[in-house]
Image (cartoon, helix red, strand yellow):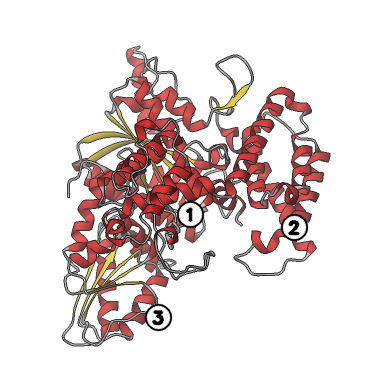
Amino acid sequence: MSTTSVKEFGKAWWSEVYNRIIGAVVFLDDYSAECLHWDGGLFNLLTGGAVAVKSLSPFEYCKKEQRKAVFITQTTRTQLRTISEIIHNSDLTHCILVSCASLDVVYLELNDGVRDASDATPAGKAGTEAAKRLEHMLLEWINKKQSVVEVVYIPIFTIAPTNVVFLTPPYQQVYPKFDKKLTTDVPTLDLYTLSSEERSCVRRLASGLNSMLDSMNIKEDIYYMGAFSSLIAGVLENSPICVSRRKSCSNPVSLIIVDRTLDLCGVTSHSMESVLDKAMAVLPRFPGHCTDVAVDMSPLCEANIITHPDDLQLSPGCLFHAEDESCVQTYDHMINKSQKEVMFDLYNKLSKIDVQKSPGPKTLLKVTPQSVEKIISASKGNYDIIGKHLGVLQQALGVVHTLKSPKRAQLELLMSLEKQVLQNLAASRDSTSVLHQLSHIMKTRKERNLPLENLLALLIHVYSLTGTEVVFTKQHEENLQQALSVAIFEDHKTLLSESGHMATPEECEQISKNIMGRLKEVSQMRKILQKYNSVLKPCETGTGHEYRGVLQQLVDDLVNTDRPDLTDLRHRNEGIKELLRTGLNILTSKKKTSKHPLDNPTVILFVVGGITAEECKQLHRSVITSGVDNVVLIGSTKFVTPVEAMRDVLNL
């Protein structure tokens, strides 16, 4: 199947799913449901012929008269057990398993620990063998003579928030870690130095990217930055299925894979300009999703709603509406435009449906959350108008709730603390008292109304910002650890809510030690870099310092017409070929010219471990203003907030 963009890639493969669902009960896991949301949502399945749509749960089943089921899943062992339960509790004769993960990878997972299992992969038989085995399992579970089963690989794993940004929700958990550590002590790194689960994550992500490149007829040059990215690059470079694909594909593209952990400042910063970043930081997630947010719709309806996080009487709204071009444009603005421009855009669209005829956008000097809210309130209970303009009303409510949220004051305070820290670090360097200040803030957080989880994100921000340039005193670090231990004990119910365990003071002390150890790891992450080992740069104005991230420095150098050396960017094709070329160059006395990513018309920059909407905006702006003709696409495993980034780093 040939596609020309990531958005088209997703659409084309969803159409393959829609061809198989007529008359079926469709069961989806959360990841597939999230990808479906970005393609048009539930109604795509219902109008496409599905008789019912259910979540992939062992408590679900088909009614007696429903004989056909389609399962859209990641085909993990746990999900296969769930499918078995659903089939046993139903009376099916026709069953289709749509695997969103490559069957080659599924084969290796099904045969994990089996000797010679990997022999089928080079022979090109792994996918076929996995399909046969899964079909046999389905037939066994259905346990009827007259039954039809099908197993098919359909690579559904991407969403495209804009034309240049794409994310991979099924791989949101993939993070540059080695047995839960940020660094690895192993001198020679390969897939088998990872745990079985981590190895699976790398293979699944690499095989997904391979399918995307295959659909887009791409033959890639692979570059990478960071140890974990080198593993993904290695699978893409050496896997037989990838080698085979490159022989038949013709569109030359440069694929750059980068570890998020090389620079954690961008994702732990509370200095948010992008409206989408602000919304994701203060609003809860849309149920089961990692990218969209849940919008409280009670201001539009006449039902008596008790508003609290667990209130399920009213379905939440969301920000992205694939079927409404006007809403898709507004979502793009939430990433790429200023808050003021987003507010004017929403007011302009709302004024066309305003039943009270508020002042037109041209007569207003400033659009406030209150002026937008006034128009929304005028539509309350008018379900005819609400039904026709549901998308823009949900987006407007989402932005209003974001800007009026009590958490906004917390974010602004954290933003000012970040700025103070940055200037103190720039001014004092070795004699810095930043940790002393942070210990004091930790102790007085309740008076300042600052959540501990945001302060932990601030700590990661500080350690990533300083890197190896600033060494904190032992006394300051011990004081910080002590303050942390007390704070974790006081707030462990919310901070460690998932465990549901009552922590003792000793356990909290151990957690604080672990956190301090992880912070020191964070400060060492850029030690492997030569050119981009510092992100604390003098301002262009000449006064003070500013943060300039590794990604930003890389893209600025990438699109620089002078083509400076990209010292820290490794090329996967180096090795014996490079040695041979060097030898020939010596013989022929010609100067060696190294490859550059811009030698190809398209560049895909993929960040493993998350990115912010603000970073996407800045990187895209650098490309646009540089004047280069190359297309630069930005991909990542997910959009991420400071608190989510903190939990990824600290394993909380």
**Horizontal and vertical percent for residue 395?**
38, 49
Query: Residue 192 — which label?
Result: 1
**Horizontal and vertical percent for residue 273?**
50, 36
Measure the alpha-carbon separation of dots 2 and 3: 39 Å
Residue 106 image-quadrant placement: bottom left
Residue at the (16%, 63%) spot, across then down? 19
Secondary structure beneath dot 2 equals helix
Give yes or no for contact between labels 2 and 3 (Cβ–Cβ under 8 Å). Answer: no
Observer able to see residue 257: yes
Measure the alpha-carbon separation of dots 1 and 3: 37 Å
Measure the alpha-carbon separation of dots 2 and 1: 30 Å
Residue 153 image-quadrant placement: bottom left
Disc 1 versus disc 3: nearer the observer: 3
Left or right of residue 4, residue 160 in this image = right
**Horizontal and vertical percent for residue 47?**
19, 65
| Residue type indicated by callout 1 | Tyr
Front residue (pair 54, 116): 54
